[in-house]
Image (cartoon, helix red, strand yellow):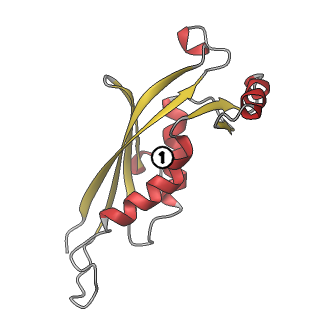
Amino acid sequence: MSNIRLTKLFGFETGHALYGYDGKCKNVHGHSYKLAVTVIGKPITDPSHVKCGMVIDFGDLKKIVKEEIVDKFDHATVFNKNTPHAELAEELKKHGHNVLLVDYQPTSENMVIDFSEKIKARLPEDVVLHSLKLHETETSYAEWYAEDNR
């Protein structure tokens, strides 16, 4: 049986700021992120299996990405917890804002690495995360490929 790649697209709105950066992105601002998640595997061949013919049910993939990424990052502001932004984060939280403190500078590059680890941990063992493509804007994106990270 052939390996098949499946891709599901997701969107979410997230704010962030890059502490120590020398450009506009040092200011708190937001993006309409688009995330393409591609997995690879062999379709189930057991005719008695409810998901026969599928590598993974798109609904199951959606559940994983929604729970691990979209539900957490959508309409949140992300700051590196190892910067003075942590103080701003605590103040915003006091006023009911959704703030995520992460262990990294919240660039698209680092976010896509973080997302890859979260998604890989939840996939069935016979399904492999092939790649992620995270659009920060319509013309700018970061990509993660499993083959580049072995």
Q: Quadrant of residue 27?
A: top right
Q: Quadrant of residue 102?
A: top right
**Residue 98, relative to residue 138: is it above or below?**
below
Question: What amino acid is labelled 1 in the image?
Answer: Val
Q: Is residue 47 left or right of residue 112?
A: left
Give the labeled residue for mark 1.
Answer: 70
Residue extending furthest toward the top: 23
Residue 43 in the image: state x and y as whole percent. 25, 73
Residue extending furthest toward the front: 95
Give the residue displayed 53% in from the left and 61% down from the top. Answer: 121
Give the residue displayed 66% in from the left and 33% down from the top. Answer: 97
Q: Is residue 11 left or right of residue 94?
A: left
Residue 49 in the image: state x and y as whole percent. 28, 86
Q: Is residue 3 left or right of residue 68?
A: left
**Residue 20, relative to residue 49: is it above or below?**
above
Which residue is more in the foreground, 16 or 112?
Answer: 16
* Total numbered badges shown on the rendered structure: 1
Q: Circle 1 sits in a helix, a strand or a loop, which is it? A: helix
Residue 135 in the image: state x and y as whole percent. 37, 32
Residue 145 in the image: state x and y as whole percent. 39, 46
Q: Is residue 23 left or right of residue 145?
A: right
Quarter of the image where the N terminus is located: bottom left
Give the residue displayed 29% in from the left and 69% down from the top. Answer: 55
**Residue 15, relative to residue 3: is it above or below?**
above
